[in-house]
Image: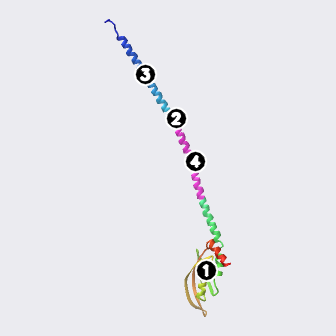
Amino acid sequence: MANINLLPWREEAREKQKRDYLGILAAVFIGAALVVYLALTVIDMMTEEQRGRNAYLQGEIQLLEKQIAEIKKIRERKKDIERRTEIILNLQQARNLPTHVLDELVRVVPPGIYLSSIEKKGSLLWIEGRSESNNNVANMMRKIKASMWLHDPNMQSIVSQNDEMRQLQRFSLRVSIGEEDADDAKTTQGASK
């Protein structure tokens, strides 16, 4: 039995194991390559899908930015219109102011006072004149305080002088012009009726 050679059988078994090992190794490599390819494909699809979402969101953001810009323009126009409307309303209210002021002056100037100058500067009225007595000027100032269109009388000066044998005082008075609040005006009108 010493002549039996077992080497070729072992060689063949080793060769078969080697072939099986290389086959399994190739199968694992192909499987791993397939898994990696599938994973890359899925990741690429997800990336493309996300890019599509991002592009959609960018489009919507640009649309919203345009709408925001339009809203800002509309608000600016609205403010401009409100400002113009306020100016028009103020002009409309001030349109008859000189008539009301002159009408009110006729009511507040008592007998014995002679007006020589009336000058309007902004919302102030500067009145200069002559008076037969200080009481007449005081009465006029009281009537101005109660007036609907004239307010805050402030005596600037009063000077005595002889004029054509009559004793007259020259006075200068500053008065604020403007309508009282609506409630105050209604109260004043109700009291005067």
Residue at the location (55% across, 86% down)? 158
Label number found at residue 45:
2
Q: Label 2 near label 3: C-beta < 8 Å? A: no
Which is nearer the N-term, disc 1 or disc 4? 4
Which of the two labelled residues, at mark 4 and mark 3, occupies the earlier sequence position? 3
Quick check: 27 above or below 102?
A: above
How far apart are the two marked residues, 1 and 3, measured between alpha carbons?
115 Å
Q: Amino acid at mark 4?
A: Leu
Instruction: Tell me which segment is drawn in magenta.
Output: 48-77
Mark 3 falls on what kind of element?
A: helix
Whole-number angstrom distance, CA of label 2 to CA of label 4 = 27 Å
Residue closest to the far bottom = 165
Question: Label 2 neighbourhood size at 10 Å, few (<14), some (14-19), many (20+)?
Answer: few
Seen as rendered, the residue at the extreme left is 2
Q: Is residue 125 above or below residue 41?
A: below
Using the image as rendered, state which of residue 15 and residue 116 is in the foreground: 15
Q: CA distance from mark 2 to mark 1?
A: 87 Å
Percent x, y for residue 91?
Answer: 63, 69
Q: Main secondary structure of the magenta part?
A: helix
Q: Which residue is mark 1?
A: 144
Which disc number belongs to residue 63?
4
Q: Is residue 13 left or right of residue 174?
A: left
- The first of marks 2 and 4 along the sequence is 2
Q: Amino acid at mark 3?
A: Ile
Label 1 packing within 10 angstroms: few (<14), some (14-19), many (20+): many
Can the viewer see residue 24? yes
